[in-house]
Image (cartoon, helix red, strand yellow):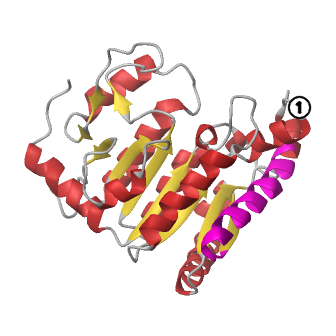
Amino acid sequence: MIEGVEREEVAQARQLAADAERVIVKAGTNSLTDHESNLDDTKLDKLVDDIVSLRERGKDVILVSSGAVGAGKGRVGYSEENIEEAQALSTVGQSYLMQRYTESFERYDQKIAQLLLTQHDLENSERFTNVRNTIETLLEWDIVPIINENDAVATEEIQIGDNDMLSSTVAIDIGVDLLVTLTDVGGVYTGNPKEDPTVERIKAVGRNYDEVQAITQESSTNKFGGIQTKVQGARNVSEHGIPAIIAESTQEDVLENIAAGESIGTIFIPINGAIND
Protein backbone atom coordinates (compact mmCIF):
# COMPACT_ATOMS: atom_id res chain seq x y z
CA MET A 1 0.00 0.00 0.00
CA ILE A 2 1.25 3.47 -0.84
CA GLU A 3 2.18 5.49 2.22
CA GLY A 4 2.67 9.22 2.68
CA VAL A 5 -0.71 10.45 3.94
CA GLU A 6 -1.33 11.24 7.58
CA ARG A 7 -4.33 9.55 9.17
CA GLU A 8 -5.51 12.85 10.65
CA GLU A 9 -5.44 14.50 7.21
CA VAL A 10 -7.58 11.70 5.81
CA ALA A 11 -10.08 11.98 8.66
CA GLN A 12 -10.34 15.74 8.16
CA ALA A 13 -10.85 15.33 4.42
CA ARG A 14 -13.55 12.72 4.95
CA GLN A 15 -15.31 15.09 7.33
CA LEU A 16 -15.10 17.92 4.79
CA ALA A 17 -16.67 15.58 2.22
CA ALA A 18 -19.41 14.62 4.64
CA ASP A 19 -20.16 18.26 5.48
CA ALA A 20 -20.25 19.41 1.83
CA GLU A 21 -23.31 21.50 1.09
CA ARG A 22 -22.86 21.62 -2.69
CA VAL A 23 -21.72 18.50 -4.53
CA ILE A 24 -20.89 17.64 -8.12
CA VAL A 25 -21.49 13.99 -8.97
CA LYS A 26 -19.89 12.80 -12.20
CA ALA A 27 -21.16 9.52 -13.68
CA GLY A 28 -19.26 7.82 -16.49
CA THR A 29 -20.64 5.85 -19.40
CA ASN A 30 -19.87 2.49 -17.78
CA SER A 31 -21.90 3.58 -14.75
CA LEU A 32 -24.98 4.03 -16.97
CA THR A 33 -24.80 1.42 -19.75
CA ASP A 34 -24.50 -2.33 -20.14
CA HIS A 35 -21.91 -4.26 -22.15
CA GLU A 36 -23.87 -3.68 -25.36
CA SER A 37 -24.03 0.12 -24.86
CA ASN A 38 -27.71 0.07 -23.93
CA LEU A 39 -28.78 2.37 -21.14
CA ASP A 40 -29.10 0.20 -18.04
CA ASP A 41 -32.29 1.14 -16.18
CA THR A 42 -31.09 -0.42 -12.94
CA LYS A 43 -27.83 1.53 -12.99
CA LEU A 44 -29.51 4.80 -13.90
CA ASP A 45 -32.23 4.43 -11.28
CA LYS A 46 -29.62 3.63 -8.63
CA LEU A 47 -27.67 6.77 -9.53
CA VAL A 48 -30.83 8.83 -9.18
CA ASP A 49 -31.62 7.13 -5.85
CA ASP A 50 -28.15 8.00 -4.59
CA ILE A 51 -28.45 11.62 -5.70
CA VAL A 52 -31.83 12.00 -4.04
CA SER A 53 -30.35 10.62 -0.82
CA LEU A 54 -27.95 13.59 -0.81
CA ARG A 55 -30.72 16.05 -1.57
CA GLU A 56 -32.73 14.68 1.31
CA ARG A 57 -29.82 15.72 3.52
CA GLY A 58 -30.32 19.30 2.29
CA LYS A 59 -27.40 19.31 -0.16
CA ASP A 60 -27.33 20.89 -3.60
CA VAL A 61 -26.34 18.36 -6.26
CA ILE A 62 -25.11 18.99 -9.79
CA LEU A 63 -24.84 15.92 -12.02
CA VAL A 64 -22.24 15.69 -14.79
CA SER A 65 -23.35 12.75 -16.90
CA SER A 66 -21.58 10.93 -19.70
CA GLY A 67 -23.35 8.30 -21.76
CA ALA A 68 -24.81 10.12 -24.77
CA VAL A 69 -22.65 8.45 -27.43
CA GLY A 70 -22.87 5.10 -25.65
CA ALA A 71 -26.65 5.31 -25.36
CA GLY A 72 -26.83 6.29 -29.02
CA LYS A 73 -24.91 3.18 -30.03
CA GLY A 74 -27.34 0.96 -28.18
CA ARG A 75 -30.33 2.89 -29.48
CA VAL A 76 -29.53 2.57 -33.19
CA GLY A 77 -27.28 -0.50 -33.09
CA TYR A 78 -24.36 1.24 -34.74
CA SER A 79 -20.77 1.79 -33.63
CA GLU A 80 -19.07 4.98 -34.73
CA GLU A 81 -16.14 4.93 -37.12
CA ASN A 82 -15.33 8.64 -37.16
CA ILE A 83 -16.07 11.92 -35.40
CA GLU A 84 -19.11 12.73 -37.55
CA GLU A 85 -20.77 9.41 -36.76
CA ALA A 86 -20.00 9.76 -33.05
CA GLN A 87 -21.56 13.22 -33.09
CA ALA A 88 -24.68 11.87 -34.76
CA LEU A 89 -24.93 9.05 -32.24
CA SER A 90 -24.65 11.57 -29.42
CA THR A 91 -27.74 13.42 -30.65
CA VAL A 92 -29.74 10.18 -30.52
CA GLY A 93 -28.34 9.14 -27.17
CA GLN A 94 -28.55 12.53 -25.43
CA SER A 95 -32.29 12.90 -25.96
CA TYR A 96 -32.91 9.34 -24.77
CA LEU A 97 -30.59 9.82 -21.79
CA MET A 98 -32.50 12.89 -20.65
CA GLN A 99 -35.81 11.12 -21.19
CA ARG A 100 -34.70 8.37 -18.84
CA TYR A 101 -33.36 10.83 -16.27
CA THR A 102 -36.67 12.70 -16.37
CA GLU A 103 -38.62 9.49 -15.80
CA SER A 104 -36.35 8.33 -13.00
CA PHE A 105 -36.28 11.62 -11.10
CA GLU A 106 -40.07 11.88 -11.44
CA ARG A 107 -40.30 8.94 -9.03
CA TYR A 108 -39.33 11.53 -6.42
CA ASP A 109 -41.29 14.41 -7.97
CA GLN A 110 -37.91 15.98 -8.74
CA LYS A 111 -37.41 18.30 -11.71
CA ILE A 112 -34.19 18.34 -13.74
CA ALA A 113 -32.56 20.60 -16.35
CA GLN A 114 -30.04 19.99 -19.12
CA LEU A 115 -26.91 22.02 -19.86
CA LEU A 116 -24.72 21.09 -22.83
CA LEU A 117 -21.27 22.72 -22.76
CA THR A 118 -18.15 22.90 -24.89
CA GLN A 119 -14.62 23.92 -24.02
CA HIS A 120 -15.39 27.36 -25.46
CA ASP A 121 -18.12 27.82 -22.84
CA LEU A 122 -15.58 27.11 -20.10
CA GLU A 123 -12.79 29.29 -21.51
CA ASN A 124 -14.86 32.36 -22.35
CA SER A 125 -15.46 34.28 -19.11
CA GLU A 126 -18.69 35.93 -20.26
CA ARG A 127 -20.16 32.64 -21.47
CA PHE A 128 -19.20 30.82 -18.30
CA THR A 129 -20.67 33.61 -16.16
CA ASN A 130 -23.95 32.89 -17.93
CA VAL A 131 -23.51 29.16 -17.23
CA ARG A 132 -22.79 29.85 -13.55
CA ASN A 133 -25.80 32.13 -13.22
CA THR A 134 -28.04 29.52 -14.83
CA ILE A 135 -26.81 26.81 -12.47
CA GLU A 136 -27.34 29.07 -9.45
CA THR A 137 -30.88 29.87 -10.56
CA LEU A 138 -31.72 26.21 -11.12
CA LEU A 139 -30.46 25.30 -7.66
CA GLU A 140 -32.51 28.12 -6.15
CA TRP A 141 -35.53 26.65 -7.94
CA ASP A 142 -34.79 23.23 -6.39
CA ILE A 143 -33.96 21.75 -9.80
CA VAL A 144 -31.09 19.31 -10.42
CA PRO A 145 -28.80 20.55 -13.25
CA ILE A 146 -27.50 17.76 -15.49
CA ILE A 147 -24.41 18.74 -17.47
CA ASN A 148 -22.81 17.00 -20.42
CA GLU A 149 -20.48 17.98 -23.22
CA ASN A 150 -22.20 19.17 -26.37
CA ASP A 151 -20.83 16.29 -28.41
CA ALA A 152 -22.90 17.23 -31.46
CA VAL A 153 -20.78 20.34 -32.06
CA ALA A 154 -17.55 19.42 -30.23
CA THR A 155 -14.73 17.68 -32.05
CA GLU A 156 -11.61 17.43 -29.90
CA GLU A 157 -13.73 17.15 -26.75
CA ILE A 158 -15.74 14.19 -27.92
CA GLN A 159 -13.11 11.64 -26.87
CA ILE A 160 -14.02 9.55 -23.86
CA GLY A 161 -12.82 10.92 -20.53
CA ASP A 162 -13.28 14.63 -21.09
CA ASN A 163 -16.25 14.77 -18.74
CA ASP A 164 -13.77 14.04 -15.95
CA MET A 165 -12.08 17.33 -16.76
CA LEU A 166 -15.40 19.06 -17.40
CA SER A 167 -16.65 18.11 -13.95
CA SER A 168 -13.46 19.29 -12.25
CA THR A 169 -13.47 22.59 -14.15
CA VAL A 170 -17.09 23.30 -13.24
CA ALA A 171 -16.40 22.27 -9.63
CA ILE A 172 -13.57 24.79 -9.37
CA ASP A 173 -15.24 27.62 -11.24
CA ILE A 174 -18.54 27.56 -9.38
CA GLY A 175 -16.94 26.70 -6.05
CA VAL A 176 -18.56 23.45 -4.93
CA ASP A 177 -17.62 21.72 -1.69
CA LEU A 178 -17.04 18.21 -3.05
CA LEU A 179 -16.50 16.35 -6.33
CA VAL A 180 -17.51 12.69 -6.49
CA THR A 181 -16.51 10.75 -9.59
CA LEU A 182 -18.44 7.50 -9.93
CA THR A 183 -16.88 4.77 -12.03
CA ASP A 184 -16.95 0.99 -12.50
CA VAL A 185 -14.12 0.31 -10.04
CA GLY A 186 -13.87 1.02 -6.33
CA GLY A 187 -11.37 3.85 -6.51
CA VAL A 188 -7.68 4.13 -7.36
CA TYR A 189 -5.61 0.98 -6.94
CA THR A 190 -1.96 -0.02 -6.84
CA GLY A 191 -2.47 -1.60 -10.25
CA ASN A 192 -5.26 -2.41 -12.68
CA PRO A 193 -7.97 -4.22 -10.65
CA LYS A 194 -9.57 -5.55 -13.84
CA GLU A 195 -6.39 -7.44 -14.66
CA ASP A 196 -4.91 -8.17 -11.23
CA PRO A 197 -7.23 -9.11 -8.32
CA THR A 198 -4.40 -8.78 -5.78
CA VAL A 199 -3.99 -5.02 -6.14
CA GLU A 200 -4.97 -2.83 -3.18
CA ARG A 201 -7.19 0.22 -3.03
CA ILE A 202 -5.36 3.46 -2.31
CA LYS A 203 -7.59 5.05 0.32
CA ALA A 204 -6.17 8.57 0.13
CA VAL A 205 -4.06 10.72 -2.18
CA GLY A 206 -2.08 13.71 -0.95
CA ARG A 207 1.70 13.94 -0.74
CA ASN A 208 1.86 10.59 -2.51
CA TYR A 209 0.30 12.01 -5.69
CA ASP A 210 3.38 11.63 -7.91
CA GLU A 211 3.63 7.95 -7.02
CA VAL A 212 -0.09 7.43 -7.57
CA GLN A 213 0.07 9.20 -10.92
CA ALA A 214 2.94 6.98 -12.05
CA ILE A 215 0.98 3.87 -11.10
CA THR A 216 -2.14 4.96 -12.99
CA GLN A 217 -0.14 5.84 -16.08
CA GLU A 218 1.47 2.41 -16.03
CA SER A 219 -1.71 0.45 -15.31
CA SER A 220 -4.16 2.31 -17.54
CA THR A 221 -4.96 0.58 -20.82
CA ASN A 222 -6.73 3.51 -22.49
CA LYS A 223 -5.23 6.80 -23.59
CA PHE A 224 -8.52 8.58 -22.95
CA GLY A 225 -10.94 7.83 -20.15
CA GLY A 226 -9.98 5.14 -17.70
CA ILE A 227 -8.47 6.14 -14.39
CA GLN A 228 -5.94 8.69 -15.62
CA THR A 229 -8.33 11.53 -16.38
CA LYS A 230 -10.28 10.81 -13.19
CA VAL A 231 -7.11 11.11 -11.12
CA GLN A 232 -6.08 14.29 -12.94
CA GLY A 233 -9.52 15.85 -12.47
CA ALA A 234 -9.58 14.97 -8.77
CA ARG A 235 -6.10 16.38 -8.31
CA ASN A 236 -7.06 19.64 -10.01
CA VAL A 237 -9.99 20.03 -7.64
CA SER A 238 -7.91 19.21 -4.56
CA GLU A 239 -5.41 21.90 -5.54
CA HIS A 240 -8.24 24.42 -5.10
CA GLY A 241 -9.05 23.29 -1.58
CA ILE A 242 -11.92 20.99 -2.55
CA PRO A 243 -11.97 17.31 -1.52
CA ALA A 244 -12.59 14.82 -4.34
CA ILE A 245 -13.55 11.16 -4.18
CA ILE A 246 -13.36 8.44 -6.84
CA ALA A 247 -15.76 5.63 -5.95
CA GLU A 248 -17.68 2.70 -7.42
CA SER A 249 -21.11 3.56 -8.78
CA THR A 250 -22.57 0.14 -8.00
CA GLN A 251 -21.63 0.21 -4.31
CA GLU A 252 -24.75 0.25 -2.18
CA ASP A 253 -25.68 3.72 -0.86
CA VAL A 254 -22.37 5.06 -2.13
CA LEU A 255 -23.23 8.76 -1.85
CA GLU A 256 -25.08 8.28 1.44
CA ASN A 257 -22.00 6.58 2.89
CA ILE A 258 -19.76 9.42 1.70
CA ALA A 259 -22.12 11.88 3.40
CA ALA A 260 -21.76 9.80 6.55
CA GLY A 261 -17.97 10.22 6.46
CA GLU A 262 -17.22 6.56 5.74
CA SER A 263 -14.07 5.35 3.98
CA ILE A 264 -15.46 4.99 0.49
CA GLY A 265 -13.30 4.87 -2.63
CA THR A 266 -10.18 7.04 -2.86
CA ILE A 267 -10.23 10.54 -1.40
CA PHE A 268 -7.98 13.34 -2.66
CA ILE A 269 -6.97 15.57 0.23
CA PRO A 270 -7.36 19.33 -0.31
CA ILE A 271 -3.99 21.01 -0.69
CA ASN A 272 -4.94 24.66 -0.31
CA GLY A 273 -7.80 25.55 1.97
CA ALA A 274 -9.15 23.82 5.04
CA ILE A 275 -6.34 21.26 5.10
CA ASN A 276 -2.74 22.25 4.46
CA ASP A 277 -0.47 19.83 2.66
Q: Quadrant of residue 197?
A: top left
* Front residue of this view, candidates 46 and 11: 46
Which residue lies at the image location 27% right of the left edge and 60% below the top edge?
260
225 up-or-down from 181: above or below: above
Which stretch is magenta? Answer: 89-111
Q: Is residue 138 visible?
A: yes
Q: Is residue 65 visible?
A: no
Q: Quadrant of residue 21?
A: bottom left
Please give left or right for residue 8 compared with residue 107 in the image. left
Please give left or right for residue 216 compared with residue 241 in the image. right
* Front residue of this view, candidates 53 and 274: 53
Which residue type carries mark 1?
Tyr
Q: What residue did someone put label 1 on?
A: 78
Q: Position of residue 191 (x, y in %)?
A: 37, 19
Q: Quadrant of residue 210?
A: top left
Q: Position of residue 5 (x, y in %)?
A: 14, 39
Magenta stretch: helix, strand or loop mostly: helix
